[in-house]
Image: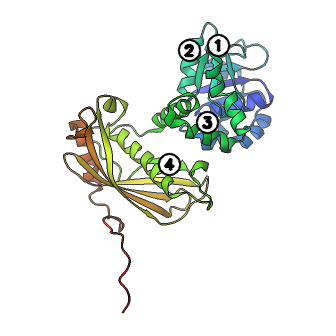
Amino acid sequence: MPSVVVVGSGAPAAEWATRYLAAGFDVHVDDVPTVEAVVRTLWPAADRLGLFPGASVDRLRPIGAQAVADATLVHVLEGDAPQWATGLVATPSTAQGASPVHLLPLVVVSGDRAAELTDFYRSIGMAPVPADADADTKWQLGEGLLRLTDGEPDALIAVMRALRPSGKGAGAAVAHHEAVRFAAGAQAPWQPGEVPPAPLAFYRTPVEPDWVDYNGHMTESAYLTAAGWGSDALFRYIGDDEAYRAAGHSFYTVETHIHYIREVAVHEPLVFHTQILGVDAKRVHLIHQMLHGDDGGLLCTAEQMLVHVDMNAGRSAPILPHVAAALQAIAHAHAHLPVPPQVGSVMRLPPPRT
C-alpha cells in the first residue's frame, strides 16, 4: 500500500496526517494514539472536502525503519530525516503548507526536488506553488481564505466550491482536487465484451453544506447538481472523458424531470443508481435514483434526455462508435430492470371530485 511517514508532533503533524490519510495513504507517525485523537476531530471536515478511495483514520501506523524505507514520502516537520529515508523527503523549508493544511490547498515547494514535490502534491489534489510565486497567488490559496471564513471548516469548503466556476485560485484548486479524487475512484472505463453493472452505482457523496437551504434540508437545485455528478461518473465509464471533450464532443442535457420524494439533511450520505432507458444515434434517455447511503431509501429521481453534440459545429451529432458501443452494452444490461414509476410522468392536478 502507498504510505507516507510524518515526523513531528502536535497540530501540524495531525493536520498533515489527516491530509495524507484523506488521500488514501497509510500514514506512519511517532505517537499513534495522540495523533489519532486529533485526526478524528479533523476527519469530518476532511470527509466533507472529499476522500480518496480507501481513505481511513484506521490506516495510521507507527514509524519503523522499514516504513521509512518504503514510504512514498517522508515529511519531516521536526528534527532531521530518518537515516533510512531513501525516497522523496519534504521538510519545513521545501514543503510549507497553510494551516489548516488538511483543508487549504496551498503548499509552497522549493529545493532540489521541487519538481517531484510538485507532482506529488498535485497527485493528492493540493495546489503546489514555487517559493517565488507572487503574493496574490499564495493569498488566494491560503491566508485569504482564512480571513474570509475565520477558518470555519464548512465555510471554508463552501467558499472554495463557490469559487470553482471562476477557474482561478481556490476555485481552480478545489476543481483539481475533485478531478483527481474522482479519477482515483472512478470505475474503469467500459471495455468491449464487458457486462456493465445493472444499475450503475458509481457516484457517492455526502450532502454538502452549501447544498442546504434555510429550511435545513437539501435545496431543490442541489438535487440537479448532484445528479450532474452522477452523469459525470457515467460519462467517464463510457469514454466521454477530458480527451473526448477536448476533441469537441460531449453530451448536453435537453430535458430533466425531477421528483422530490424525501428530504435529506447536511452531511447525510447519498448513493446514485443510474439506469439507461434508451439509446439511439444521438440521444440517451436515463434516470438517476438518489438513495440514502445508510437506509437505502429513495430520496429523488432525475429522469433526463441527453443529446450528443459536436461542440465545434454547435449542433447535435452522432455519438462516436466506442462511446455508442458502451451505451448499447449498458442499455442491453439494463433492459431487464423494472422501469421506475416516475419515468414519463406528467405534472398535473388531479381531476376534481364529483
- Point 61% across, 43% down: residue: 158
Which amino acid, by three-letter code, is at mark 2? Glu
The image's mark for residue 22 is 3
* Distance Cα–Cα, label 4 vs label 1: 37 Å
Give how far across and how far down residue 166 sits, in percent: 51, 33
- Point 43% across, 51% down: residue: 227
Which of the two discs, 3 and 2, labels the residue nearer the N terminus?
A: 3
Q: Secondary structure at mark 2?
A: helix
Q: Nearer the viewer, residue 347 or 128?
A: 347
Which amino acid, by three-letter code, is at mark 3? Ala
* Residue topped by disc 2: 116
Give how far across and how far down residue 50 sits, in percent: 57, 40
Here the colouring is rainbow
* Distance Cα–Cα, label 4 vs label 2: 32 Å
Work out whether residue 51 can be spotted. Answer: no
Which amino acid, by three-letter code, is at mark 1? Ala
* Residue topped by disc 1: 131
Q: Residues within 10 Å of mark 2 (few under 14, many from 20)?
A: few
Q: Nearer the viewer, residue 182 or 127?
A: 127
Most distant residue in the bottom direction = 354
Q: Quadrant of the N terminus?
A: top right
Horizontal placement of 84 versus 227: left or right? right
Which amino acid, by three-letter code, is at mark 4? Arg
Horizontal placement of 309 versus 200: left or right? left
Are dots 4 and 3 in contact, CB under 8 Å?
no
Q: Secondary structure at mark 3?
A: helix
